[in-house]
Amino acid sequence: MSEKPWGGRFESPTNEFVEAFNASIDVDARMYGEDIAGSRAHARMLCQQGILSSEDLDAILRGLDQVSAEIERGDLEFTIALEDVHMNIESRLTAIIGDAGKRLHTARSRNDQVATDTRLYLRTRTDTMIAYIRKLQGVLVTLAEEHAATIMPGFTHLQTAQPVTLGHHLLAYVEMFERDAGRFLDARKRMNQCPLGSAALAGTTFAIDRNMTAAELGFDAPTRNSLDGVSDRDFIIELLAAASVCAVHLSRLAEELILWMSAQFHFIDLPDAFCTGSSIMPQKKNPDMPELVRGKAGRIIGGLVAMLITVKGLPLAYNKDMQEDKTAIFDAFDNLQGSLRVFGDMLPGMRVNVEALHQAASSGFATATDLADALVRAGVPFRDAHEIVGKSVGYCIKADIELHQMDAAACQQIDPRLTAEMVGALSVEACVAARNHIGGTAPDQVMAQVALWKTALENN
Ligand code: ARG
């Protein structure tokens, strides 16, 4: 027999560089467990259907146990000559058990094999990813509880807008991560269909039982169309999309942490264990972890774009281009999981400068909207109120004071409807406390949301 499992019709050997360039073993070796599980299910099904003898099945199952043990011990050396994890394992199995090993690939192709293995592998990885998202949500909820009443400036255009509570700000991220987990769960549902039995593209002449293999491998059902079964890479694109959105959320949080840790903001300090220094500037403590997480987002989005472009021009069914899918998705998953982990580990050690946050919220006229609201309550139409407070802000900028420091004379001069009681009642505490409705920033609302999140996360 030829050295390559497909070598029968070839007359000359593979070009040496092509052998290396063509191989995917470096990337797909990590799917060995799924490949072996798929082979076990396939062999059992072949035996049940009378396509494989029970002696051959026994030999295959025992042989696969040995191959698995060898890989786990690091005793099996994979070779690029055998291209990928599927042929490496089959070849080793055949070396151990002989002819029975050569019968395993009956009614199967690497095309349905790789599609099955990848779905199995990514299913587990998706579950792990969701667990990491949940863990980070839990960390943020704990911080939100601690800072339910910590007042900070809320921004639009990165300009001071209105006071918010830090707890409320952090819970905004918990919401984003909840949708991210939902996207992963959604993708997982659609992905959980078994392509095994699609064979190369058209199905097989053998009387296989696809329900059996699908059930044994924990899939909801077999895929319904063999061409689609081997051609579909939607599941990878969807997971990359879910990963990209999640990475974007992490990146926004990262950006805020970086800003907040700057000397100019001075809102937070991140633990030493998650920062690094400078080789020349002795004073430096840099937020490398948020920066790296922000950087990883670009790379993960790159994976999504790469796969969309790779698949868009592919005719049915399998094309070798598809081998690139694993590079993109494995890299994205490794980096997203790492990002979630590092934030989950780092944030409990974040020191919050409550004083600086309060100070920042108290300057920059963050209470202006509330003053306009007070005028409206006294019967002034909102547009007039807006104009009056706008003028008041202009006055305060010139006088270098805050709104609540305006005296009665100044108020009267701007507009007779503006009173000293109105400006005197302004405080950032009152601002946040007043926004006490569903979705508002009031400490009471934050605590109510924290309670809901705690129950939700416990039940996950
Ligand atoms: N290593 C290949 C991949 O990852 C496996 C499928 C190869 N199939 C084929 N017909 N060449 O896509």
Image: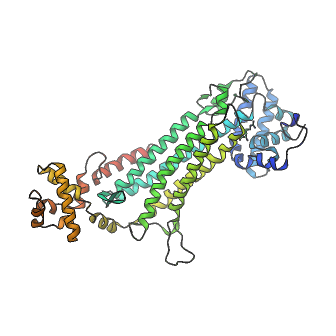
For the N terminus, which image quadrant?
top right
Up the image or down, 437 lies above or below 192; here it is below
Give the quadrant of ligand 1. Answer: top right
Up the image or down, 283 lies above or below 257; here it is below
- Here the colouring is rainbow
Q: Give how far across and how far down residue 323 sits, in percent.
A: 70, 42
Q: Which residue is drawn at the image coordinates 75% and 40% (left, top)? A: 86
Would you say residue 277 is visible in this rendering? Answer: yes
Q: Which residue is drawn at the image coordinates 32% and 68% (left, top)? A: 355
> On the picture, is 395 further left or further right than 41?
left
Q: Depth check: give the residue in front, 416 or 458.
A: 416
Would you say residue 337 is visible in this rendering? Answer: no
Q: Give how far across and how far down residue 338 sits, in percent.
A: 56, 55
Q: Give how far across and how far down residue 145 sits, in percent.
A: 36, 55
Q: Depth check: give the residue in front, 70 or 339.
A: 339
Number of callouts = 0
Up the image or down, 429 lies above or below 64; here it is below
Q: Give how far across and how far down residue 43 sits, in percent.
A: 75, 31
Q: Which residue is drawn at the image coordinates 56% and 42% (left, top)? A: 239
> On the picture, is 352 further left or further right than 76?
left
> On the picture, is 61 further left or further right than 235?
right
Q: Depth check: give the residue in front, 366 or 27.
A: 366
Q: Depth check: give the residue in front, 285 or 419.
A: 419
User: Can you tell which quarter of the image residue 68 is in?
Assistant: top right
User: Can you tell which quarter of the image residue 153 is in?
Assistant: bottom left
User: Can you tell which quarter of the image residue 50 is in?
Assistant: top right
> On the picture, is 423 further left or further right than 291?
left
